Amino acid sequence: MAGRALVMGKFWTVLTFFTLLAMVGLIQGRSMLTLISLMYIGALFFRIPDTWQEVVTIEFVGTAGMLLAIISGPLIAMFYVFTAQWITRFVSPFGSLEDYNDTFIESSSYAATILLSPILITISENVLLSFMLHFMIVKFIITQFLNFFIYRTALITEFFYDLVSLPFEIFQSQLLLSLFGLSILSSFGVDGWTLGSLDIISKVI
């Protein structure tokens, strides 16, 4: 019982911390602080279920990282995706089935892909869904590269799990970007981007 209370306490402490940061950002007019705090809160609710089940991948952190990469450049976005992956793993109120290798691979592949985001943005020609598709494909390739060194005995299993998960990640990311992507970019004065459509998937592949 005490252990359960401790786990729930960690979750609510982190949630309260980022909620207070978001409020400070709003009061002081610090839009970036508000946005990042809300993205951490989003990660808490969207990513935590992903840490205790191995069936459906829930995409949020990568999409938030893409938007941060466009708004502020790779460094802040890399910091966010890496820390969001690990924080949500350790404060999950449900416990975690995700082992350290999975968290390391996910956080590292996101960070490495964001490091390449200036190239991906150039290729995508400021079309948001095109950027997302390139991002997801590159992240998938980097993940398989890391799996090769970490999951040698289960490499085929990991490959097919990631391959099956990829369309779901793309769909979820498309939904989030369609709902919030352009409005977030415009609120930070980032102009010249269009949403596009997934018809461009044939051009990407």
Image (cartoon, helix red, strand yellow):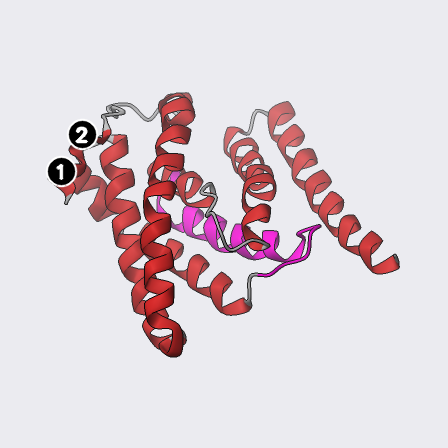
Residue behind mark 1: 202
Badge 1 element: helix
Label ID, residue 176: none
At label 1, the amino acid type is Ser
The residues tagged by marks 2 and 1 sit, at their Cα atoms, a distance apart of 7 Å
Residue 69: quadrant of the picture:
top left
- Front one among 97 and 31: 97
**Residue 58, relative to residue 96: is it above or below?**
above
Residue 56 spot, x, y in % from top left: 47, 47
Estimate how packed mark 1 is, as few (under 14), some (14 to 19) or many (20 or more) residues with alpha carbons within 10 Å. few
The C terminus sits in image quarter: top left
Main SS, magenta region, reads helix
**Residue 145, relative to residue 131: is it above or below?**
below
Residue 32 spot, x, y in % from top left: 50, 33
**Residue 76, relative to residue 148: is it above or below?**
above
Tell me: 16 left or right of 25.
right
Badge 2 element: helix
Tell me: 121 left or right of 82.
left
Magenta stretch: residue 93 in it? Answer: yes
Estimate how packed mark 2 is, as few (under 14), some (14 to 19) or many (20 or more) residues with alpha carbons within 10 Å. few
- Front one among 30 and 84: 84
Identify the residue at image location x=71%, y=50%: 93
Residue behind mark 2: 199
Pointer 2 and pointer 1: residues touching (CB < 8 Å)? yes
Q: Given the current orientation, which residue lies at the most extreme right position?
A: 2
Start and end of the magenta stretch?
A: 72-97
> Is residue 184 in view from this perspective?
no
Identify the residue at image location x=69%, y=46%: 14
> Is residue 41 in view from this perspective?
yes
At label 2, the amino acid type is Asp
